Image (cartoon, rainbow, N blue to C red):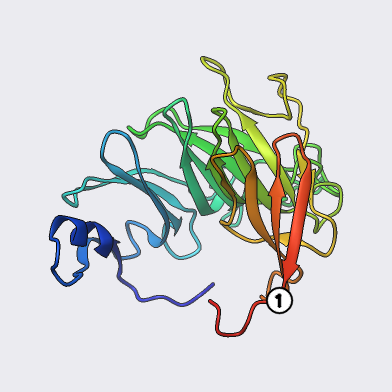
Amino acid sequence: MKSKPAVLSLLLAASLLTAVRAGASPTPTELFGFNGTNGQDPAKLIQAPDGNLYGITYLYSYRQGGTVFKLTPGGQFTQLFATHPSPSDASFFPDGNFFGDLAEGSDGFLYVAAGSGGPFTTAYGIPLNAGTLLRISKSGAGFAIAHAFCSSGPPGCADGEGPTSIVPGLDGNLYGTTSNGGGCSTCGVVFRLHIAPGGPPSICRVSTSGQITRIFQFPQPLWPANGTLSQGSNGLLYGVALVNPNSNSVQTVFQLDTSGGVSSRSFRPRSSVV
């Protein structure tokens, strides 16, 4: 994990400040500082229709699960949810661990991609740590696991393993990627989380049956890059996959329709490109 200062701050985007104060020099304004007891390593921030900011932290505290928080534009902070280890095993996070992405669903709930943890274990009781999708109301109540990955078990984890991205789709569903699983341990998948009005969410391809069906499996040696999935106004999904997840030497930009049709273009970025 990357080393970061003990106190982390959320900054109001300088572009917003500039829009209000036309002609003034951009000046970031600190809204809130994390200190390790209320969260650590903020990972995503979104603004909901109610005007408030909602976000996640990768960790709660050292070696602890992540948090979901609410922040008013004035800087009032409320922790909505935090995951904790099992009382019997400090390394087991049945609800999920290492929060990596956040989106608001068409049902008004917050959805969190937890890249590790989850309720499933091996026959010997060892956690699979395949990750979960969590569903939380904006009041902090009504928490549920929308989906726990590797529901079919290893090897392969057909529904995916280690969710990395989750984005709202134009059709009211959520789309995301996993870094592993999908038929081979290191393939990764693109998935759809179907949100049925008045019913529980389920991962599926086109139906609301709740059966796990991946939309697309990445061929080896491609890995979907963290947090790069988005949907264009044309309804197509776009993202970046890496040949080596620990290197940016070769990248593939892919285009994917929601039925699984894919096209891609590979390129080798210059060293000056960040």
User: Residue 224: x percent and y percent?
Assistant: 69, 58
Residue 153 figure quarter: top right
Q: Is residue 215 left or right of residue 55?
A: right
Along the line of sight, the residue nearer the viewer: 221 or 2: 221
Q: Determine whether, in the image, residue 65 is placed left or right of residue 4.
A: right
Residue 96 visible in the shown view: no
Residue found at the far top of this picture: 198
- Quarter-wise, where is residue 194 in the image? top right
Residue at 75% in and 34% down: 259
Q: How many marks overall? A: 1
Q: Position of residue 215 (x, y in %)?
A: 76, 38
Relative to 186, say whether 108 is above or below: above
- Residues 190 and 38: in front is 190
Comparing 258 with 160, the one in front is 258
Question: Crowding near pointer 1: few (<14 within 10 Å), some, many (20+)?
Answer: few
Quarter of the image for residue 266 reads bottom right
Q: Position of residue 98 (x, y in %)?
A: 54, 56
- Residue for badge 1: 268
Q: Quadrant of the N terminus?
A: bottom right
- Mark 1 residue type: Arg
Q: In the image, what residue occupies the spot 56% across and 56% down? A: 227
State whether residue 134 appears in this view. Answer: yes
Q: Is residue 90 above or below residue 168?
A: below
Q: Is residue 185 above or below residue 191?
A: below
* Secondary structure state at the residue bearing disc 1: loop
User: Residue visible at 16% across and 49% down?
Assistant: 74
Image point 69% across, 50% down: which residue? 255
Can you say whether 163 is above or below 62 in the image? above
Whole-percent x and y of residue 111? 50, 38
